[in-house]
C-alpha cells in the first residue's frame, strides 16, 4: 500500500497540533509518519515533515517542543548532527529585500491577470505584501542540522509560493530549483509581512500556505492508496465556531476540494482537523506557543477518541503499517 502524509500550515500552534495527531496515530494504530511513502509539508507542516524524513519521530519532536526527555534514538540523532549544516541562503540579499517597505513583487498582479487560472488569490496577496523583517535563518540552521545539503530522495515535498508570479513551487520535485531542505523549509515558513522572503536563484519565495494551507493535491500523481491529512487551520465536523471562524471556513473549503480530487482518483483519505477542544487550546494567535504541550496533549486525546469510536479508521491505518 502506498501512503501519503500531508501536513498543513498553521504556525507554531499548528506544529503542535500535527505532533499531537501523529503521536496518537502511532500509539493507537502503529502508523509512523517516518515510513510514509510521500510526505508533503506546508509552512509549519514543513518543519514536522522535514523532521520525519530525517528519522526524527513525532514523539521525539513533541518532546523537544514540550521540553521533555526524548528517546535515546532521538537524542542521539540531534547530538550527532549526522549531516553537515547547509550553507545559509544569501543573508545579505535577503536583508536588503526586508529593508524595503513596498510590495514585495508588484509584477505578480500582472502575471495573475495573464493567467488567472494558474494562481490563487491568497498567493497574489502574499506577493503584494511588503517583506517582513524577521529572518528565517534559525529555521534553516535547525533543519540543516538534520538533513545537511542532501535531499531525502523523492519522498519529501515542501510547498512555497514564488513571489514574482504568485505560483506554487513544490521543492523536491523536478520542476523546482534544487535546494537543501533547510532552505526549502525556511521558504515555506516565510509568512508574508512577518518573515523576510527566502531568495533562491534570485527569486523571492514566501509561505506555501498562500496557495493552499494544505496543498494535498500535490500527491495526486503519486497515486497513493491512503492519504492522511492533518489540517490545523480548518475545523472538524461539529466544532464550535471560534473567533477566526471565517478563515477556518475558507481553509476547509479549499481542503474539501483537494480531498474530492484525491478520492476521485481512488485514494482513501483520512482528514484530521481541530475539534472544539483543540480550538480552545490553540487560541487565535498561531504564533503563540505558550500552550504547546497542552495543544499536543489535547490533539492526541481527541484523535484517540475518534479512532476508538471509528474502527474503520483504525483498519485503514493498520493496513499502512
Image (cartoon, rainbow, N blue to C red):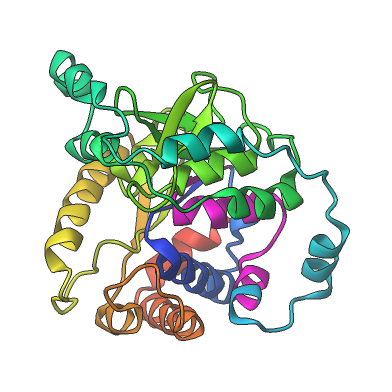
Q: Tell which of 131 and 45 is nearer to you.
A: 131
- Which quadrant: the N terminus? top right
What percent of the width, then of the height, locates residue 106?
24, 26
User: Which region of the structure is painted magenta?
Assistant: 38-63
Residue sitting at the far top: 114
- Which quadrant: the C terminus? bottom right
Q: Is residue 5 left or right of residue 238?
A: right
Residue at (64%, 77%) from the top-left corner?
63
Q: Tell which of 99 and 315 is nearer to you.
A: 99
Q: Is residue 264 left or right of residue 135?
A: left
What percent of the width, then of the height, locates residue 238?
16, 75
Q: Is residue 212 above or below residue 107?
A: below
What percent of the width, then of the height, locates residue 297?
48, 84
Q: Is the magenta stretch mostly helix, strand or loop?
A: helix
Residue 59 sits inside the magenta stretch:
yes
Residue at (63%, 68%) from the top-left corner?
61
Residue 124 sits inside the magenta stretch:
no
Q: In this view, does 249 lie to the left or right of 51?
A: left
What percent of the width, then of the height, locates residue 90?
61, 33
Q: Is residue 249 left or right of residue 118?
A: left
Amino acid at each position: 500500500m502506498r501512503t501519503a502524509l500531508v501536513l498543513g500550515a498553521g504556525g507554531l500552534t499548528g506544529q503542535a497540533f500535527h505532533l499531537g495527531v501523529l503521536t496518537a496515530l502511532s500509539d493507537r494504530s502503529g502508523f509512523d509518519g517516518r515510513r510514509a511513502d510521500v510526505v508533503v509539508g506546508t509552512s509549519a507542516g514543513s518543519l514536522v515533515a522535514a523532521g520525519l524524513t530525517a528519522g526524527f519521530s513525532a514523539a521525539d519532536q513533541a518532546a523537544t517542543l514540550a521540553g521533555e526527555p526524548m528517546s535515546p534514538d532521538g537524542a542521539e540523532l540531534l547530538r550527532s548532527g549526522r549531516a553537515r549544516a547547509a550553507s545559509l541562503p544569501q543573508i545579505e540579499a535577503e536583508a536588503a529585500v526586508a529593508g524595503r517597505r513596498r510590495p514585495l513583487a508588484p509584477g505578480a498582479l500582472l502575471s495573475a491577470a495573464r493567467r488567472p487560472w494558474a494562481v490563487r488569490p491568497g498567493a497574489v496577496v502574499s506577493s503584494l505584501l511588503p517583506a517582513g523583517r524577521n529572518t528565517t535563518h534559525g529555521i534553516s540552521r535547525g533543519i540543516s542540522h538534520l538533513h545537511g545539503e542532501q535531499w531525502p530522495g523523492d519522498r519529501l515535498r515542501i510547498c512555497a509560493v514564488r513571489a514574482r508570479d504568485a505560483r506554487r513551487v513544490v521543492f523536491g520535485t523536478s520542476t523546482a530549483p534544487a535546494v537543501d531542505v533547510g532552505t526549502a523549509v525556511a521558504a515555506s515558513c516565510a509568512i508574508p509581512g512577518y518573515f523576510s522572503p527566502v531568495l533562491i536563484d534570485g527569486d523571492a519565495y514566501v509561505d506555501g500556505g498562500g496557495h493552499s494551507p494544505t496543498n494535498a493535491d500535490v500527491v495526486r500523481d503519486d497515486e497513493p492508496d491512503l492519504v492522511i491529512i492533518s489540517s490545523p487551520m480548518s475545523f472538524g465536523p461539529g466544532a464550535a465556531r471560534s473567533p477566526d471562524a471565517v478563515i477556518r471556513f475558507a481553509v476547509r473549503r479549499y481542503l474539501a476540494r483537494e480531498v474530492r480530487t484525491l478520492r476521485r482518483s481512488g485514494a482513501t483519505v483520512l482528514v484530521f482537523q481541530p475539534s472544539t477542544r483543540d480550538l480552545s487550546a490553540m487560541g487565535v494567535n498561531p504564533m503563540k506557543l505558550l500552550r504547546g504541550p497542552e495543544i499536543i496533549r489535547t490533539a492526541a486525546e481527541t484523535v484517540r477518541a475518534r479512532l476508538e469510536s471509528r474502527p474503520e479508521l483504525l483498519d485503514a491505518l493498520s493496513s499502512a503499517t
